[in-house]
Structure formats: structure tokens, C-alpha cells
Amino acid sequence: MKSRKIYNRISVLREERGISRKELAEKIGVNFQTVGYLEREEYNPSLDLAFRICEYFQLPIELIFSTEPLKPLSQELLEQKYRKG
Amino acid sequence: MRKKISKTKRRLGVIVNYLSLIIVVILFYIVKHEGWHNLMITGMFAALLLTVITFITVHLKTGLWKFVHTKIEQLDEREIQVTHESLRYSYSILSVILLVIIFIMSLAATGNDVLGPVLPTSLIYLAHTLPSSVIAWTENEISHG
């Protein structure tokens, strides 16, 4: 069965934190090329790796990964705020 | 992987590597049947040299050889997936090639043929290099170590 494409915000979050692919790779325990593949959405991470990424960025999984193309993070947070009232 | 080579160049390297190997095998059997001719022997060694050069360029310099021989504990989940895929394709490709060779040999067999060392050696080389060739052929970006 062909798996669905998983969209993510890894590259935005990494650049926001000012860290290199190599540094992120070391933190989440993968080869730095794998970070490139993740950022280009050419590779779907395992659940374990996805959680490691979320733990590193200290964000909930739904803010980093999605099966739908992701909106800008600021827009997403604003919408969440309005939903809560 | 130390040296970055574009996917197109890697693919070209894989084609040249195996084509030169086929030329070595063909020339060896021509020489064996027709006798020793300087031109044939020169051609055989030139093809062999080309096989060695392309092996160094595609497999050693890119680090692919090291990559496919790395212990599984030292690879991340994507790299494990890549090596598993390459082994799966290699197994299928090798099976087809062996079947074709067996078929050709059974048609060409005269009863007193001696196989000689070149074809078995080439097949062992093929079996051993196929996984890294598959990775060289399919991966957009390769890096290890």
C-alpha cells in the first residue's frame, strides 16, 4: 500500500531556531541527509522519529506534521485562538 | 559519502561499469575460442581497467560501498529503508540475469565446454555491487559518514 505524503514544518522551525541540518540531525539521531529528505517531504518519518522531532521543537505533533498541505504557522495559531474564542 | 556526483553521472557510471564488465566477459570467451590475439587482449584489459575506474568513481569515492557495508545499528531509519529496497531490487535483477545466462549457456552448450573463471567472477562482482548500484541509480542525494 502506498503511504500518503506527510507535510511538515521542519525547515521553517529549524530556520526559526537558527540551527543547521547537521545540528538538528544530531539532536534527533539521524544522518543530516535524512533531515534534507524530511524537509523536502521526500521521506515520511516513523512515529518514533516524528515524536523525537516534536520533543526537540517542543510543539504538538499536529503543528509540525499533517496529511494536508500546511498553512503558515502564524495563521494556524491565529485560527486556533479564534476557535477557542 | 565523500564525493558528490550528480544522479545522471552516477547512472552513467553504473552503465559504463557493467558494460565494460560485459565486454571483458565476451572478449575472454572470444579469446578462449579463437586463440590469443593482441588486439583482443588489449581490449580486454582496457575494458577491465574501465571497470575498475568506474567502480572507484561510482562506489568508492561516493562512499556508497561503505554505506551498503555499514552495520545496520549505525544507519538511521531512512538509510535502513534505502538499503532494504536496494537489496530487494538487486535480488530480482540478479535472478533475472542468472536465468538469462543459464538459458543462453544451455542453448550454446556443446558438451565439452569449460566455464572458466571470468563469468563466475563477474557474477560474484555483480552480486556484490548491485545494491550500491541500485542506490546510485535511484537516490537523488547520497551521503553517509
Image (tube, rainbow, N blue to C red):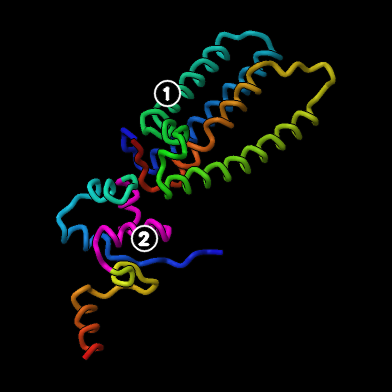
* Amino acid identity at mark 1: Ile
The amino acid type found where label 2 is placed reads Ala
The subunit carrying tag 1 is B
How many other residues sit within 10 Å of disc 2, few (<14), some (14-19) or many (≥20)? some
Which chain's residue wears label 2? A
Which residue shows up at 27% across the image and 61% down it?
A10
Q: Is B142 inside the magenta-drawn segment?
A: no
Question: On the image, numbered disc 1 is attached to which residue?
Answer: B53
For the residue labelled by badge 1, is the local secondary structure a helix, a strand or a loop?
helix
Residue at image position (31%, 38%) is: B4
* Count of numbered tags: 2
- Assign the N terminus of chain B to one quadrant of the image: top left
Res. A50 mark: 2
Quadrant where the C terminus of chain B sits is top left
Which contiguous range is marked in magenta? A32-59
Looking at the picture, how far across and down is residue B17, in whole percent? 49, 30
A61 horizontally vs B131: left or right? left
